[in-house]
Amino acid sequence: MTTTQPDSIDATLEALTVQGYFASRELATALYLALRMERPLFVEGEPGVGKTELAKAAAGMLGTTMLRLQCYEGLDTASALYEWDYPRQIMALRLAEAAGERPGNDTLYRSEFLLKRPLLQALMPDEHHPGARRVLLIDEIDRADEPFEAFLLELLSDFQVSIPEYGTVRAAQPPLVVMTSNRTREVHDALKRRCLYQWIGYPDRDRERAIVAARAPETSADLQRRAVDFVHRLRGMDLFKAPGIAETIDWCRALSALCVTELDPQSVQNTLGVLLKYQDDLARIDAQEIAQCLAVPE
């Protein structure tokens, strides 16, 4: 596993491919620039197109572990940055008093009592991979509240944070920050301007076949090809939620688990719930629609 960042866009593409991630050249360019310019990378796209997997692949490429902050409504700094281990602090306080010592900050606010959350961990060296650049995934930032965006903007400006009782923690090397959004709401322009931006859309057939071949190798090449073609036809229909790449991979695995070797209408009907996750979409794709999709010349 490599522990150095790629020195060109082509090298980035190749390194991502080694990790099983088949990126477009535009996405590889954005990642390469994020590394070179030490800027966060903000990626948007429909669910299941590979936004989270990009951060995982980047961590593998850099030879480090990925830190993940899953955003949600009401996310605060205690969950995202740090908090103190109060039970251990109280125990240390009582032990100090029992020993006749006068407790101070050096008793209560030591490193071992600091519960480091993903944002703080990202500013610190990776103990398991010395010298490797940290990778921080801030997943689904659109689900967090706007005040958290403002806090995040300040943190990412200098890659440092001040803890009143402990001191300032500054990243010796800025981490690679990948922020994702499913566009459930618009993220503030100030945060977007701080980042490099890339939209991840659905891949073309050839790239999706390569992804499926890497992620669902137990499925035959012919079934992979026909499954990807079918999914692409579904995406051309008026669905509430078109299937993503993740659903294509899951579908191929499901077909393989059922020992399906030929994509026929009944097999598709039986497993359509792997691809479509809304009742209206399942009702929209009836037996006639399935037969027509399968009958389309390739």
Image: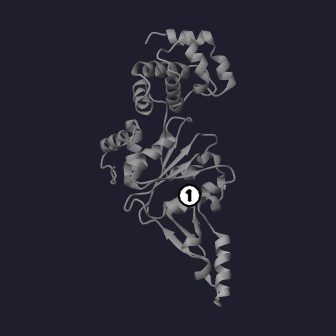
Tell me if 109 is positioned left or right of 219 in this view.
Answer: right
Which of the 4 image quarters holds residue 3? bottom left
Residue at x-position 30% and y-position 46%: 8
| Nearer to the camera, 42 or 231 | 231
Tell me if 1 is positioned left or right of 51 in this view.
Answer: left
How far from the left and from the top, in percent, is residue 95? 65, 82
Query: Is 10 rendered above or below residue 227?
Result: below
Question: Disc 1 marks which amino acid?
Answer: Leu
Residue at x-position 66% and y-position 27%: 278
| Nearer to the camera, 164 or 266 | 266
Tell me if 143 is positioned left or right of 200 in this view.
Answer: right
Tell me if 33 is positioned left or right of 233 in this view.
Answer: left
For label 1, the SS is helix
Q: Residues within 10 Å of mark 1 (few under 14, many from 20)?
A: some
How far from the left and from the top, in percent, is residue 283? 67, 18
Describe the colour scheme in one phrase.
Answer: one colour
Query: Is 153 rendered above or below residue 107?
Result: above
Viewport quadrant of the C terminus: top left
- Read off the residue under disc 1: 153
How far from the left and from the top, in percent, is residue 98? 67, 86
Residue at x-position 59% and y-position 71%: 113
Query: Is 203 rendered above or below residue 132?
Result: above
Which of the 4 image quarters holds residue 289? top right
Which of the 4 image quarters holds residue 101? bottom right
Q: How many marks?
A: 1
How far from the left and from the top, in percent, is residue 178? 49, 49
